[in-house]
Amino acid sequence: MILTIGWMYHDIMNLYGDKGNIMVLKKRCEDRGIDVRISYCDIGDDVDLSAMDLVFFGGGADKEQSSLMRDLLSRKENIQKALDAGVMFLLICGGYQLFGQYYIDANGNRIDALGIFDYYTVSGKSEERCIGNIAVRCELEGQSMTLVGFENHGGQTYDVATPLGDVLFGHGNTAQKKQEGFYNGQVIGTYLHGPLLPRNPEFADFVIMKSLRKSYGEQCLEPLSDDMELAAKNIMLKRMELL
Ligand code: GLN
């Protein structure tokens, strides 16, 4: 089996080591004999995202987000084609925001986003900046899990019809500390850097399983030893007084 990943703007959207997510996907696939092929989709690159199994888009500051907007908007049709073809999407922070209606940045500039989903993001007052460790409780297709990560965003995301989970610690979509992220069965949007997948191996496998479905149907993944990962995760849960 081969898992193909379209990595959007890998050179500019890589806050807090978001590229660690790709390294984890690669390692966890290869440990199970699944090859991983990465196609870089940077500004100006000719890539058909609908041919991928998974599209990954990391986070970035306001300046980076504005710098790629023209290119991103030119890919809207292709992104829609990828969604229609059943490609899985994993979007972190700045990437997550840009799939909504718009983003009003810290200077009050309105960035018209892809408009694929109804949610929208507005930079809050400086005291509303959401920074620090975060833990989120998720129910994902019958699987319960607690995700840990790190968030740092001024943007407050509203009108999220289907959040990824409930905030146990930290902020999430808004400074009100209620829900975190977005998940509609195909697209995951989340404020969790951390990076997300090294800290949450069960979630990494969930993403792999969902991504393999397009080309290979339902797959059972061989379990891996996650002792180190889970020990690290437990340290974070203890720090947040959740364990
Ligand atoms: N610039 C955005 C914000 O501050 C996204 C930041 C990020 O990706 N961490 O809301």
Image (cartoon, rainbow, N blue to C red):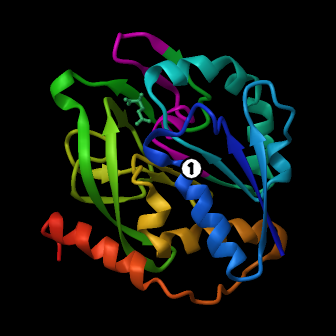
Task: Using the rendered image of the protein, determine whether residue 95 is visible from the camera's viewpoint.
Answer: yes
Q: Residue at x 34, y 17 (%)?
A: 106
Residue 94 rendering spot, x and y as whole percentages: 48, 34
Residue 173 vs residue 117, the one in the foreground: 173
Tell me, yes or no, whether the highlighted magenta stretch contains residue 109.
yes
Q: Residues within 10 Å of mark 1 (few under 14, many from 20)?
A: many
Number of numbered discs: 1
Q: Residue at x 48, y 32 (%)?
A: 60
Can you name the residue that lies furthest to the left here? 241
Lateral position of residue 181 relative to residue 70, left or right: left
Lateral position of residue 187 relative to residue 213, left or right: left
Q: Quadrant of the C terminus?
A: bottom left
Residue 112 rendering spot, x and y as whole percentages: 55, 18
- Amino acid bearing label 1: Lys
Residue 174 rendering spot, x and y as whole percentages: 28, 39
Residue 37 rendering spot, x and y as whole percentages: 80, 59
On screen, residue 81 above or below 110:
below
| Ligand 1 in which quarter | top left
On screen, residue 76 above or below 70:
below
Q: Quadrant of the N terminus?
A: bottom right
Secondary structure beneath disc 1?
helix
Q: Residue at x 35, y 10 (%)?
A: 107
In the image, is the residue at mark 1 within 8 Å of ligand 1 by its beta carbon?
A: no
Q: Which residue is mark 1?
A: 19
Q: Residue at x 55, y 46 (%)?
A: 91
Lateral position of residue 158 relative to residue 72, left or right: left
Tell me, yes or no, whether the highlighted magenta stretch contains residue 55.
no
Task: Using the rendered image of the protein, determine whether residue 209 is visible from the camera's viewpoint.
Answer: no
Residue extent of the magenta highlight:
90-110
